[in-house]
Amino acid sequence: MADGSSVAQGVTITREDCGPFWQVTAWPDTLDAVAVRLGGIAGVQAPGPGAMVDSDIGQIARIAPLVWWVVGTTAEAARALADIAPEEGTALDMTDNRVRFSVSGPYARSMMMRLAPLDFRDRSFASGTIAATAAHHMSVQIARREEAWDIYITATFADALAEVLAETAAQWG
Amino acid sequence: MSGYRLDQGGLIDRADPLTFTFDGTEYQGFGGDSLASALMANGVDVVGRGFKYHRPRGVMSAGVEEGGAILTVGSGRFREPNVKAPVQPLYQGLVSSGQNAWPSVRRDVGRINDVMKRFLAAGFYYKTFFGVRGGTKDWMLFEKVIRRAAGMGRASRAPDPDRYETAHATCDLLVVGSGPAGLAAAKAAAGAGKDVILAEQDFTLGGSFLARSGGIEQAVAAIEGLRAAGVTIMPRTCVFGLYDGCVAGMIEQVSDDPGLHGVRQRTWVVRPREIVLATGAIEQPLAFGNNDCPGVMQAGAVSTYLNRYAVAPGKRAVIATTNDSAYAVAADLVTAGIPVTLIDARPSGPDAPEGVKVMHGTVPIRTTGSYVLEGVDVGPLAEDGYATVSRTLPCDLLAVSGGWTPVVHLTSHRGPKPVWNDTIHGFLAGSTTEPIRTCGAAAGIYAHDDCVASGQAAGTGDAGPQPEAGPHPAMPLYEIKTHGKKLKRFIDPQHDVTADDVRLAEREGFVSIEHNKRYTTLGMATDQGKVGNIIGIAIMADASGRTIAETGTTTFRPPYSPISIGALAGRGTYMHFRPVRRTPLHEWNLANGAVMTDAGLWKRPWYFPLEGESVDDAYIREMKAVRATVGLCDVSSLGKIMVQGPDAGDFLNRVYVNGFAKLPVGKARYGVMLRDDGMVYDDGTVWRMSDTDFLMTTTTANAAGVMAKLEELLQTRWPDLKVQLTSVSDQWAGIAVAGPKSRETLQAVTTDCDLSDAAFPFMGIREARIAGADVWIARISFSGERAFEVYVRGGAADAVMQALWDAARPLDGVLYGTEALGALRIEKGHVAGSELDGRTSLHDLGLGGMASSKKAFIGKAMMDREGMRDPDRLQLVGVAPVDASRRLRAGALLDTRTDLIDHGQGFITAVTDSPDLGHWIGLALVKGGLERWEGKEMTSYDPARDGNTAVRILSPHFFDPKGERMHG
């Protein structure tokens, strides 16, 4: 489709540019302080492990014990994020590092079950959850956003994943 | 056997007639039929041939244990051999054919083997190794014949046209089997609020319900209840194995006609919290004379064909049994109007069903009929265990029940060996501490109501009923022995293994059941011993004077029944075998004429040919242009790792042999890292972006490995260091701008960066803007020319590359690929992957001077151990042909001898035709290196290609050895 998405009867797959994308990390002894700092910039409580929240400065995801991602942030927020003392943590502009595929539709969950060895049931993977895994030998992070699933993959693997997604989704029309 | 369709009944859909073929003849069946039931309904009696003796075979069962009706389904590239007819659902247009016969299963010239059967007993194959004359000469003749005869079906050689995929699922409880026990277990668990998956290998749910008169209605009601309770029901799904962590492997037969986008089979990897095995039991045959004759089948299967498929397997039946279950079969036959005589080996049994004549203390001894069943000789079993023929019962159907053996394979996959139980005369699952429970017939419980109770208990984890012998215990009888003429008593009908074969193997010393299996091939056909194993074990025990328990079983391993390799591969085939990795400049490269090559997972531009150019023409032209003017090369695939934190400099000092802690901001430095054993691991450059931020580059091949290694160091050896590692390989495109006019090219596109030598010395890094995008520029060189590497975010890569190309073209610049890239570095003597092969040290490569003496680093302790300083080690040199017109070959050995029979003094690692020098050159690793060989002649030894070439050993730095061009 013109916007880079493809639609099968049961699945819609949309390829998206993540926009400005920053990584913020803490050291083990500065975790709380960095969480407070990030929360202050974002206007929300920084998420705990495996969680993703919406905020004024974009989506914030805790993708590792000491690592947050801020996805789709603003230039002003980026400056604030970058202004972190090395003794406190690190900030890194990762724009263009990842591509996001959004999977939605009646067969979205079935689609995800064919990609990764995760428990995609509601009880285990509610909206606002993010997990790191692998799909077809490629490292990915998968987040759930209401009834849609967002797959984050490093940019140079994106075309390969797109091919697998399209081929898998074809069985539903 | 002369089967026919009953006028009513069954689970078939008589409103859905289906046409199919067998061996070119068209037949009709109905929706809900299996291929076996449809063939039987059409009176087709012979559907296969045994492996060795090519004796005719008919349908023997109604399940995966089938040993006779093994057919090929499909044709051309859709051909699938060794399909068990009882488990193949019939569909419109199904094409099937017999196997292991010529010209057909009905008339097979291979039957001549039956005449020669005395020479084809178990182990005959191994005895051909010795031959008639001794030695292996005869074996080479026998081998050709045996190989041609081996195998049952023939697979298509064409690429598999079907698609497969893998899927994952999680649940609280996985129930395997949808018979009475399985349905009860699923219902009980769902009622307790558990998330349940019910897997059934058959295409219709119900298990033994489907064999019972009135059972179908009970099954339908139970299944509807499960659907309403939210149980995930998966028919045509076989659980083929259980693995660590209670993970279950399943294969789902999705569709026989998947169409363009559908999948044919799906592998499921299921992670349940608990598993209930309601896998049922398999009816055992008896070993008696010519028991392989078409018309002989499992007694329980007769009821299945009558009740599920409305097919009568014959017109006149005899039932031979050792237990009570066959009495219900007799009743079903009478209901269908088929006269039946029941012979029971036991002296007494339950009341005979109305209309059934019962003969107690009687066993089958031998079938009669040269092609299909015509009758069976029967007689009493004497106290010495031998039987004598007393009469012949005419029949075209002989239903045999030698008892039941629980299906315990899946538990066995987890390690516990099956345990013999004298109450049921069968093996039960060994005990396990894993959350796996067995119920119903799989637990030796055969009475229907007890099965249901057993399933209910298993579903909720409660204690259930135990196996009982009942008022008329089954008789443990496996083999009917007779005095006088030897009879062929088959225990493995697919591989034609007889009772005598098992005894022969035991006499020849194969006393372990595992060895007996391999020697006789009992259980090694597609039924995997499901009907023959127990009889084989019993005969082995009898022959060796042991009990069955002492003899034990072979080891059960996955898969439970055969699975397609394609299903295991899933979508990981062809282009998806490995993911393809594309640089941000991939499309730009293609649009500008690149011929691509594979570099690991990456697609990289190999060369950019002008019209009519070969790869050699192109790379030579590209090299010349880089040396003369300027060239642009996509180097995005290099690994890039951000190293951040207050301890980043210290970390890099520990990782590299040379120092980085004091590298000034705005400078880059070449570094080498070693393994713990002192061997060179990788090289690259490190750019200092700020006091605490460094960008590390690695080789393309080692990017992931270096990242993993660095993470391991931080997490296990130096957890106190405050260092954050992040792979940024994907977000940065890298463009090498190399050549005397590289500065001019860059200057044309960037106005905010002073590129003069004074402002931008060698190994400096600067920020700039090109085509509206922020870039980093480093003055580093792999080619040996003045060169820069421009790093830009992937999203702006095309624009920056286009701007550079627009600036380079007026200067007669070129685009160059990996061929020229490699050739340029060879001229300079720069090491790369073919020299950094994990066996070379710093000293071997002439880089020993790089190693700091003032700091500790990975590999320092081992790099100078005695073996690593041996002057006889392979060391880096250059090599050129004495005759300048000769070419060199990478991989050629080097030595002073011309008749080389060992590894010589070394080998050539990389070569190129050098336009700058006018002849071929190469890099090599030679014992003793330059110190021993510089200026001397050796022979390049390459018998597989160009033969011998005289070469001279030189410094590896062929071109601009002082580096004036790149520093200037």
Image: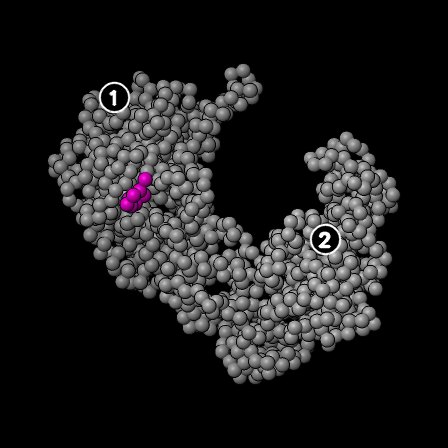
Circle 1 sits in a helix, a strand or a loop, which is it?
loop
Is B192 contained in the magenta span? no
> Pointer 2: what residue?
B621
Q: Residue at x 39, y 42 (%)?
A: B78
Q: Nearer the viewer, residue A165 or B410?
A: A165
> Pointer 1: what residue?
B388
Q: Answer yes or no: are tags 2 and 1 on the same subunit.
A: yes
User: Chain letter of disc 1?
Assistant: B
Q: Does residue B453 lie above or below B150 as drawn?
A: below
Circle 2 sits in a helix, a strand or a loop, which is it?
helix
Q: Is residue B397 visible?
A: no
Quarter placement of the N terminus of chain B: top left
Quarter placement of the C terminus of chain B: bottom right
Q: Does residue B478 lie above or below B238 as drawn?
A: above
Residue B600 - label: none
Q: Where residue B731 appears, x then y in whole percent?
A: 61, 67
Q: Nearer the viewer, residue A6 or B670?
A: A6
Pointer 1: residues within 10 angstroms few (<14), some, or many (20+)? many
Q: Where residue B317 appears, x then y in whole percent?
A: 19, 32
What kind of residue is marked 1? Thr
Residue B932 vs residue B569: left or right? right
Image quadrant in which you'd find residue B86: top left
